[in-house]
Image (tube, grey):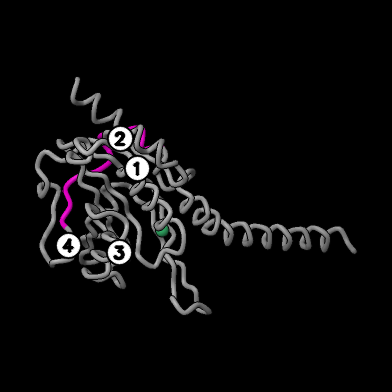
Amino acid sequence: MTRSSLISGLGVVAVVVLVLAIGLLPRLGVWFGHDGTAATGHGVTTTLTGEASIGGPFTLVNGAGETVTESSFPGQYLLMYFGYTYCPDVCPSSLYAMSLALQDLEPALVDKIQPLFITVDPERDTQAMVADYAAAFHPKLIGLTGTSEQVTAAARAWRVYYQRVDMPDSAVGYLIDHSAFLYLMRPDGGLATFFRHGDQPDAIAAGLRAALTQDASG
Ligand code: NI
């Protein structure tokens, strides 16, 4: 092998490695994103420290076809989770943990909280589907969907990362990888606290209790 062919051979290897690495990046993002603990590269982790940058106005639709906005629950804390009903694992376990936490919490505190499940899959998740899905986890949990534009705007306001992953060999057709934070928003719209996928129900209950009682005393 001549020197020049060796160099060009290395060049080809370098290009192949680069292409593989680039091809791998979205998968890595997807993996870490759904886990909800390391959704870096999508601004989630960093922006969670800046309370002002999480949340905002939103316009969505509930199971009865009624418009729901940030003003629909005056005086209430909003406990918000973005996901989708076809989610095989992360959404059910996160919502189950949330449900157990709410069962743990004193009824007087639960009265101050309005839990919301917001789909990031409005294409498949109809009004009836999100409503039924949410109600299966907790009687207070309200499922919301909307037009693609409405859902995109809400997800953007909460810095939710989500990306469709086509599954051509699967009956469901596609999955959606998404960040999996549970946000507690104050009645004034500010972020009170948040929880990660994998947080245990008792830890979530303790966090909710601390946030609500701190606000009440402060
Ligand atoms: Ni999910």
The kind of residue on which mark 1 rests is: Ala
Q: For ligand 1, which image quadrant applies? A: bottom left
- Which label's residue is closer to the chain start, 2 or 3? 3
- Which label's residue is closer to the chain start, 2 or 4? 4
Mark 4, Cα crowd under 10 Å, few <14 / some 14-19 / many 20+, is: many
* Above or below, 137 relative to 63: above
Q: Which residue is mark 4?
A: 62
Query: Looking at this view, is 96 or 189 the one in front?
Result: 96
- Which label's residue is closer to the chain start, 1 or 3? 1
Tell me the CA gap for discs 2 and 3. Answer: 23 Å
Q: Quadrant of residue 5?
A: bottom right
- Residue 98: image x %, image y %? 35, 47
**For discs 1 and 4, the disc positioned in front in the rendered view:** 1
Image position of 20 (left or right of 105):
right
Asked whether 51 falls inside the magenta stretch, the response is yes
**For discs 2 and 1, the disc positioned in front in the rendered view:** 1
Q: Which residue is located at x 68 percent, y 58 percent? A: 17
Q: Which residue is mark 2?
A: 208
Tell me the CA gap for discs 1 and 4. Answer: 23 Å
The kind of residue on which mark 3 rests is: Tyr
